[in-house]
């Protein structure tokens, strides 16, 4: 499980406009995603998690930094640009707008085979399409239907089938279940689990729903204004968040059966990314903010339990949480 | 106080139909719901269950294609079942108001938000200066800093969370008896959601307003509401105090909804789920339990006889599995 499948080195996406105002949508993210794991990425909207995901699937070009897939730079040369993206696929958030409404489901699935698998005959392609539909729990009759004839859950199954038809190794699920009802959400999460086992897939699971992310993921990264502020094992992180932002995020998630006590006061909103606060970007909302926080930017450091965290007082908070446990 | 003044919303045996290809299809069937003064009540269910339709009829905003087949709606003791627009206009915004799901589209983009709030008071005969002061006070109550600046902002200058707070101000400025909140936080981030819900709770306690929250999020319900109605395909399948429903769900649908919520303690296990999805209007059975085709505890009688509501304690449930005897045990 410790083979690095995908690695980003100082990955940044910076937008500038005519007035030279700069938005660092993704700011210097270096992380590793291991073969076969599910890596969860959480944060408020506008924190850059989707931008990060889109760079991995080559929908956006990074301003700085590198993406290594199986040790190979995906932008290295023409061959890499053509071959690697086939192994990295994406499932989009909104199944209502991500499928071409004018095309039948069968065609939507076949399209990528026509482009990328030129040696296949028509019959072979049809067979693969049938198998894929069967895998995601739809029968053959769906091939001749249009997306508008399908429910949200069925469309998301089609999106999954499209993403998996080229046998990818890595799938970016960008809010893949957010638009669905809870009962359908559970069906799709189970399906994603089954497919992961069957094809030994690796997922990057992007969502703002902490319950979903902590259920699905092996490791979680928490993003705030373009940077990772805390990264660690899913269970450790959700049971014992250390970074004040992670604490706030987990306090605000309303879980059935949770007690209201022990929750952190939630204050403020995400600052504008075009004018981020100085020092630690979270200091404007942080209840423990000191002078140091507003002047110096904390670097990611590793704690004894293996998690990475960007906070000046990480050690102190960690000690406190350990004492509380005892 | 007697019973009629204490109940701010009472829906009795309400049935609403749509005409689809010449066939009458029930969108809401035999629905009973009451909201008492000062209460926070939740209406939960999947999308397509008729929650929003039920809310819009309680505001007199039901679509014209829908026809009210049977039942009555009493708002603040007043029978509004046959009321026309003029009658609704006398109580809308004053006795009952509504917060919509999308804070991005429910405010007038060409008008300063302060004036939109004040307008609602002006319409009720409050003098201009007083209306402005009231609006400013509401903005402060909603926890928005720098009320004077916000008053002079246009909606596009505010964030989603701020806009939703403006909607709350707008809805509550006349201290209505009832506030209907239709998915008030679905479009917002988790951190903002928690803040907005807290504001709704606080402000309504202050103004003595009863709230009917429509949501699909059981987490929100369990943290916020006193009583819960669980709705499935146009009918209430279970109702009662929230804590009882969350801790001891009885109806298979409620159980299913709770079981399919992912969370860290279920890690590595398969999530239970409810098979299929909510049937479209024209495919709903006329007799028998509507939930029968998705129920994993379905019996023979379920498809043949429509289950009746059974009341026990403060709860009501409509399921063949239960009789008065086995409920009281």
Image (cartoon, grey):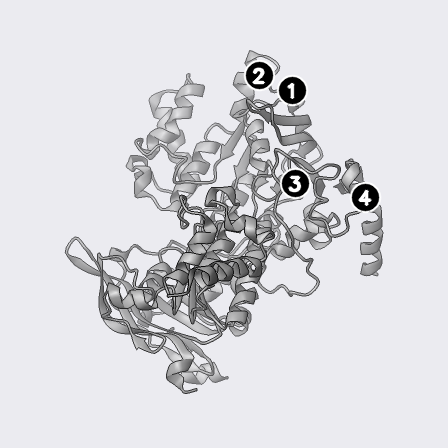
**Figure check: A139 above or below B166:** above
Labels 1, 3: one chain = yes
Q: Which residue is mark 3?
A: A224
Pointers 1 and 2 in contact (CB under 8 A)?
Answer: yes
Counting from the top left corner in percent of width and height, residue B161 is at: 53, 50
Q: Considering the image in quadrants, where does the N terminus of chain A appear? A: top right
Calculate the distance from the C-alpha at mark 4 to the C-alpha at mark 1: 43 Å
Labels 1, 2: one chain = yes
Calculate the distance from the C-alpha at mark 3 to the C-alpha at mark 2: 31 Å
**Figure check: B105 above or below B6:** above
Check disc 4 and report its element: helix, strand or loop.
Answer: helix
Q: Which residue is mark 2?
A: A80
Q: Nearer the viewer, mark 3 or mark 2?
A: 3
Residue furthest to the top in view is A78
For the residue carrying disc 2, how many other residues have a C-alpha within 10 Å: few (<14), some (14-19), or many (20+)?
some
**Front in this rendered view, residue A33 or A243:** A243
């Amino acid at each position: 499980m410790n083979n690095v499948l995908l690695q980003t080195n100082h990955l940044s996406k910076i937008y500038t406009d005519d007035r030279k105002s700069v938005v660092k949508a993704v700011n210097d993210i270096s992380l590793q995603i291991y073969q076969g794991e599910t890596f969860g990425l959480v944060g408020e909207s506008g924190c850059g998690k989707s931008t990060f995901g889109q760079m991995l699937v080559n929908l956006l070009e990074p301003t700085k930094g590198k993406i290594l897939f199986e040790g190979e730079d995906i932008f290295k040369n023409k061959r890499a640009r053509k071959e690697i993206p086939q192994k990295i696929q994406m499932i989009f958030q909104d199944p209502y707008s991500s499928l071409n409404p004018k095309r039948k489901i069968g065609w939507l699935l076949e399209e990528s085979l026509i482009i990328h698998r030129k040696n296949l005959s028509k019959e072979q392609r049809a067979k693969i399409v049938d198998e894929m539909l069967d895998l995601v729990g739809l029968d053959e009759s769906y091939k001749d239907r249009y997306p508008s004839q399908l429910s949200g859950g069925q469309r998301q199954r089609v999106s999954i089938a499209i993403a998996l038809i080229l046998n990818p190794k890595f799938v970016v699920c960008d809010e893949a279940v957010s638009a669905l009802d809870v009962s359908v959400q559970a069906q799709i999460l189970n399906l994603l689990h089954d497919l992961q086992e069957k094809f030994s897939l690796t997922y990057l699971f992007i969502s703002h729903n902490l319950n979903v992310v902590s259920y699905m993921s092996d490791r979680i990264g928490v993003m705030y204004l373009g940077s990772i502020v805390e990264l660690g094992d899913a269970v450790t992180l959700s049971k014992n968040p250390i970074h004040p932002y992670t604490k706030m995020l987990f306090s605000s998630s309303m879980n059935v059966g949770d007690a209201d006590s022990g929750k952190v006061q939630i204050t403020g909103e995400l600052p504008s990314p075009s004018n981020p606060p100085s020092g630690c970007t979270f200091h404007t909302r942080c209840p423990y903010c000191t002078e140091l926080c507003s002047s110096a930017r904390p670097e990611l450091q590793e704690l004894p339990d293996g998690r990475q965290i960007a906070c000046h007082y990480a050690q102190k908070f960690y000690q406190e949480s350990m004492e509380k446990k005892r | 106080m007697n019973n009629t003044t204490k109940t701010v919303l009472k829906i009795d045996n309400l049935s609403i139909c749509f005409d689809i290809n010449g066939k009458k299809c029930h969108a809401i069937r035999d629905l009973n719901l009451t909201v008492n003064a000062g209460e926070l009540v939740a209406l939960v269910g999947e999308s397509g269950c008729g929650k929003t339709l039920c809310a819009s009829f309680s505001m007199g905003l039901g679509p014209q294609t829908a026809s009210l087949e049977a039942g009555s709606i009493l708002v603040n003791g007043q029978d509004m079942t046959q009321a026309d627009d003029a009658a609704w206009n006398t109580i809308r915004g004053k006795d009952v108001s509504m917060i919509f799901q999308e804070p991005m589209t429910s405010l007038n983009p060409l008008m300063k938000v302060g004036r939109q709030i004040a307008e609602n008071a002006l319409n009720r005969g409050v003098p201009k200066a007083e209306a402005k002061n009231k609006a400013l006070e509401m903005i402060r109550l909603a926890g928005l800093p720098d009320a004077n600046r916000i008053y002079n902002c246009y909606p596009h200058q505010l964030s989603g969370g701020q806009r939703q707070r403006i909607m709350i101000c707008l809805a509550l400025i006349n201290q209505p008896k009832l506030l209907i909140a239709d998915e008030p936080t679905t479009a917002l981030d988790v951190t903002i959601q928690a803040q907005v819900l807290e504001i709704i709770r606080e402000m309504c306690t202050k103004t003595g307003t009863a709230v009917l929250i429509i949501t699909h999020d059981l987490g929100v319900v369990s943290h916020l509401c006193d009583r819960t109605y669980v709705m499935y395909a146009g009918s209430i399948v279970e109702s009662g105090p929230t804590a009882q429903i969350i801790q001891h769900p009885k109806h298979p649908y409620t159980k299913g909804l709770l079981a399919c919520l992912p969370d860290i303690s279920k890690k590595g296990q398969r999530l239970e789920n409810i098979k299929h999805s909510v049937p479209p209007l024209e495919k709903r059975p006329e007799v028998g339990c509507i939930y029968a085709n998705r129920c994993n505890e379905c019996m023979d009688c379920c498809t043949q006889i429509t289950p009746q509501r059974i009341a026990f304690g403060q709860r009501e449930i409509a399921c063949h599995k239960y009789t008065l005897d086995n409920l009281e045990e």
